Image (cartoon, grey):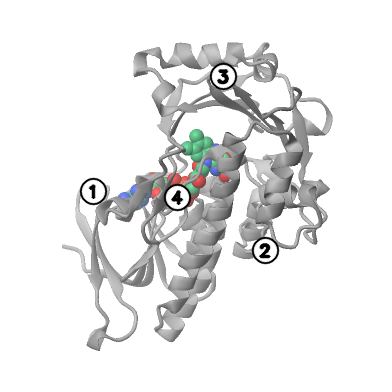
Amino acid sequence: MTPVRQCDVLVVGGGPAGSTLAAMLARAGLEVVLLEREAFPRYHIGESLVPEVLDVLEESGALPAVEAAGFLPKAGGVFRWGAHPEPWSFRFDEAKDRYHRHYAYQVVRSTFDALLLDHARACGAEILHGFAAREFFEVGPAGGAGLAGGRVLASAHDGEPREFAARLVADCSGQAGWLASKLRLRKYDPFLRNVALFGYFRGAARLPGRDANSILCEAMDLGWLWNIPLHDGTNSVGLITQAGACPAAGERTRFYESAIQKSVYVRDLLSPAARTTELRCIADYSYRPSRLVGPGFLLVGDAGNFIDPIWSTGVFLATTGARLAARAIGEALRTGDHRALLEYETAIRRLVGRYRQFIYFFYRTNAAPANYFWKAYSLVNGAVDPEDAFIRLVSGRLGV
Ligand SMILES: Cc1cc2nc3c(=O)[nH]c(=O)nc-3n(C[C@H](O)[C@H](O)[C@H](O)COP(=O)(O)OP(=O)(O)OC[C@H]3O[C@@H](n4cnc5c(N)ncnc54)[C@H](O)[C@@H]3O)c2cc1C
């Protein structure tokens, strides 16, 4: 058996949460080992970013590589949603805030995630691909005072078990929820129980003018559709439908295609296009954890919380979670006091809770855009007016 690998922080999972956390901790001088079960680049859904992601990546140092990758810049979004019969749009630069970056990107996640992980390696984190975390053991602090650490057993690509010992373990394993399922921490949202069916098209038309690279979301009787143009010439097109309405596997392609045919705006954009990939299906049930922090561990990104993809908040919450976790871990390891980790938990619960409230309202209220703006106004501190609050919310600009 190979000797136990000791480190300050063991990060499990190399998606945006894990790679951003590893980069930030390594830049702060901590010894970081990251286990990723897949070889990269690997496929992942979740292509549409919001502006705040770029600010977090500026802080982690990954932004120059992302800016140089050629991804499509995204000015905002277009929605056919609610009581308004025509599509309505918003632009990030309509915010009356102090931020200078009012755009985001539509990213091909295999490329984006690999860039972030390469950056974490360049910052000094040790990245081990083909390593899947299996078992977790809390290691109590000597004498009972101070921070507990963690021991992890992982299986490696060569079939050999490996052991790691860390002052803290950060679970960034995404929806797979390594620790959340092991410790039974995950609670599913009874309202947001949806299924996503998605594929990629080539040859689609673009929205006119400045909306050309924007995400289009179109509500319809079967659920809602997204259309995201990507820099490789493809479009990501997905249907979100209630779990109870989604047919059995053999019927899904017909269901997905009929949803596109029943739509107005997505169908129009796709009329010159052909689907070039198989259809993928993922249950995008939303969930939260009974706790985000425990003895020797914390959960970051989708490993802790997932809320509906309607506002493209997944990568934002994963990277912002990593930013907050990096600060908390640095403080906890420096002082030996776990209170910083509890503050991390409180901050994430507040942040995710605001988006959850907004998304509930958005799904449940067949309203005019102005009603959505007013709801945002009730959730965002310091906004100038309801429109400003809305743009800040959908940009991820909540001052966290
Ligand atoms: C239908 C749908 C559409 C979405 N659209 C968007 C969007 O447009 N914009 C957006 O921002 N977000 C979107 N999201 C959400 C987004 O994909 C996620 O929020 C984001 O990927 C979370 O990042 P993460 O790092 O927490 O997890 P992930 O990106 O899932 O990364 C987790 C990593 O952990 C690894 N792993 C898992 N288990 C283990 C283990 N035991 N050991 C080692 N490694 C392990 C996995 O291989 C993976 O690489 C969407 C989600 C869904 C379901």
**Cβ of disc 1 within 8 Å of ligand 1?**
no
Q: Nearer the viewer, mark 4 or mark 2?
A: 2
Label 1, secondary structure: give it. loop
Q: Left or right: 308 with respect to 57?
A: left
Cβ–Cβ under 8 Å for marks 1 and 3: no
Mark sitting earlier along the chain (2/3): 3
Q: Quadrant of the N terminus?
A: bottom left
Q: Nearer the viewer, mark 2 or mark 1?
A: 2
| Separation of residues labelled 2 and 1 (CA atoms) | 45 Å
For residue 25, above or below residue 306: below
- Across and down, in percent, residue 81 comes to 67, 29
Residue 326: horizontal and vertical position, in percent? Answer: 50, 68
Q: Nearer the viewer, residue 389 or 325?
A: 389
Q: Quadrant of residue 363?
A: top right
Residue 399's disc is 2
Q: Mark 4 belongs to which amino acid?
A: Asp
In the rendered image, which residue does mark 3 sit on? Answer: 221
Looking at the rendered image, the disc whose residue lies closer to the viewer, 1 or 4, is 4
Residue shown at 58% from the left, 54% from the top: 354
Residue count near mark 1 (Cα–Cα under 10 Å), binned few <14, some 14–19, many ≥20: few
What amino acid does circle 1 point to? Asp
Q: Secondary structure at mark 2?
A: loop
Disc 4 target residue? 302
